[in-house]
Amino acid sequence: MKNLLLLFFFRFAAKGWLPAQWFEPNLPPEEMRAARTGRLHMEIVTHCWNYSHFLVYQLSSLVLFPPEDMDITMTVFYCPEDRKTVRLLDFFSRQDIQGITWNWWSLPRQQLFRRGIGRNLAALETKADWVWFTDCDLMFRKNCLDTLANLLQGRRDALFFPKEERCTPLLAEDNPILQAGTDKPRVLDIDTRIFTSHFPGKATGPLQIVHGDVCRAVGYCRSIKLYQTPSEVWSKAHEDRAFRWLLNTRGKPLPVPGVYRVRHISKGRYTGTGTNTRLRTFIRMIQSKFRGY
């Protein structure tokens, strides 16, 4: 009950009803952030629990479309109990791609289940110029990262997001796209013909591109205990809204091509009864209908 009340409190606060400075006073002003130019270094941070059949597409996109003008550290938070993800990460660790550094970060299941914990660890320890916080169903395809490297030259803004993302319809677990990812670990491309364009209006959970100096100064919701508390079940991610509030911005859009996301009906990472799972699926379908994709 206490956590539920805190969740409602911070969702209320993140609407702007309370000053973010009360909770995070150390946000560096823009003039104190480095305006990096030249060959930039970006860290991509993702989480995976029982989603190796999505993660394979994300990691494959870096192998198939490696950037020429940017260095990438690909950080994946995982739990050793998830054997399929462990096998997938072991396979990709042997893919030697110029400009790509694989970084697998093991966490106990209870810490992995609270996405803010991993994101905060990565934010505070990053050595990168920029950090892209994302989910494992997102891909970085042709021209994505090289275009982004050009757009970020000399920028000091705290938060950006891609102006456009291309998404699938909601896919069932038996869809061939999802089934292909359940096979043995391999570099796997995807048929992009069923993807359609959508235009987010803010830096949502998988689309948060953050200045490295900001990450090192404030972490990721580090001052909000709720979002740094381990959980016995996968926690629905509300912390991205609080993070935008703490940074005092919805983010600025950038015309970045090649951002693709696989959308799916069944949320396999959640635990609970069959009735609970069916209810989540129904709600997800209704939400998609009202959003128009």
Image (cartoon, rainbow, N blue to C red):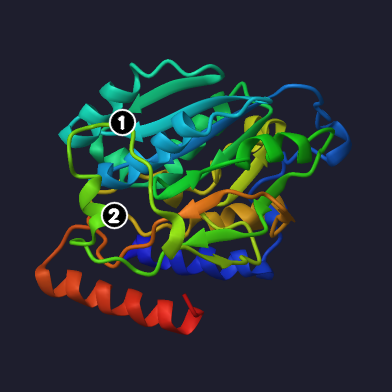
Question: Please, is residue 51 above or below residue 78 in the view?
Answer: below
- Residue on which disc 1 sits: 107
Is tag 1's residue or tag 2's residue first in the polypeptide sequence?
Answer: 1
SS class, disc 1: loop
* Of residues 83 and 178, the one drawn nearer to the viewer in this rendering: 178
Q: Provide the residue designation for mark 2.
A: 177
Rendering quarter of residue 185: top left
Q: Is residue 101 above or below residue 132?
A: above
Residue displayed at 72% across by 44% down: 25
- Mark 1 or 2, closer to the camera: 2
In x, y percent, where is residue 290? 47, 84
> Tag 2: residue type?
Ile
Crowding at dot 2, Cα within 10 Å, few <14 / some 14-19 / many 20+, comes out as some
Q: Is residue 17 visible?
A: yes
Q: Residue furthest right?
A: 31
Q: Residues within 10 Å of mark 1 (few under 14, many from 20)?
A: some
Q: Position of residue 7 (x, y in %)?
A: 44, 64
Label 1 to label 2: alpha-carbon separation: 28 Å
Q: Residue at x 67, y 70 (%)?
A: 17
Task: Look at the numbered disc 2 and give the secondary structure of its residue.
Answer: helix
Does residue 6 appear in the picture of this structure?
A: no
- Residue 79 placed where, x, y %? 25, 33
Q: Nearer the viewer, residue 247 or 256?
A: 256
Determine whether 278 is above or below 104 in the image: below
Q: Residue at x 21, y 61 (%)?
A: 173
Q: How many marks?
A: 2
Residue that appears at 18% across and 36% down: 84
Q: Which mark is residue 258?
A: none
**Identity of the amino acid at label 1?**
Leu
Query: Which quarter of the rendered picture does the N terminus lie within?
Result: bottom left
176 sits to left or right of 104 = left
- Taking 204 as reference, is 292 above or below it? below
